[in-house]
Image: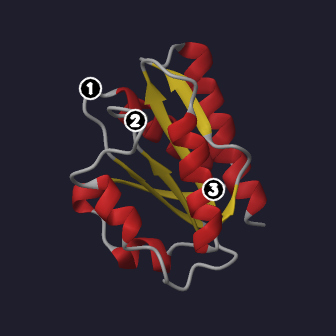
Amino acid sequence: MKVAVIYWSGTGNTEAMAKAIGEGITEAGGEAIVKTVSKATLEDVLQADAVALGSPSMGSEVLEEDEFEPFIANLKGQPVVGKVAGAFGSYDWGDGQWMRDFVARLGDYGFKVVGDGLIIQLTPDGEGLEKCRDYGKAIVAAGK
């Protein structure tokens, strides 16, 4: 199972999550393709068996607006119905509304989202990185 892990990170927190999710995907027998959103294409999403999409919470609990938001908006109307997706990101404050909105939006696009997404406050510690690896494994399991 090929899983595209596509993310935006400003401070490195979401990047650390992406890499750990990729490790979990590999540990579960999948192939993780980890890319920043600036290097990702629509084809990366369409050709993968599953995706994991990550952005930190920005401003008033929204996705990163310059690169990540346009990439996600471009997924609307694409042939993704039933494709497994994970959603993840780090945050500093708030209660995770941006992730609830993101998960709902991916569901509206037709993705089969794994759980409620994964959020970690600030820099993921050892326990947080383990949660990320477990989420990567869950994405693979959901796609089987």
Q: Earlier in the sequence, mark 3 or mark 2?
A: 2
Q: Quadrant of residue 58?
A: top left
Viewer-proximal residue among 80 and 5: 80
Dot 2 crowding, Cα within 10 Å, few <14, some 14–19, many 20+: many
Viewer-proximal residue among 120 and 36: 120
Evaluate if marks 2 and 1 touch, with contact meaning CB atoms under 8 Å apart.
yes
Question: Looking at the picture, how far across and down is residue 4, in whole percent?
Answer: 47, 61
What's the amino acid at mark 3? Ala
Viewer-proximal residue among 15 and 59: 59
Label 1 secondary element: loop
Above or below: residue 95 compared with residue 51:
above
- Residue at 33 percent across and 64 percent down: it is 71
What's the amino acid at mark 2? Pro
Question: Looking at the picture, how far across and down is residue 112, in whole percent?
Answer: 70, 65
Q: Which mark is residue 56?
A: 2
What is the CA distance from the residue labelled 3 to the residue labelled 2?
Answer: 16 Å
**Can residue 84 be spotted in the picture?**
no
- Residue at 69 percent across and 36 percent down: it is 134
- Residue at 58 percent across and 79 percent down: it is 80
The residue that mark 1 highlights is 11
In the image: residue 14, left or right of residue 140: left
Q: Which mark is residue 104?
A: 3
Question: Looking at the picture, how far across and down is residue 40, in whole percent?
Answer: 30, 64
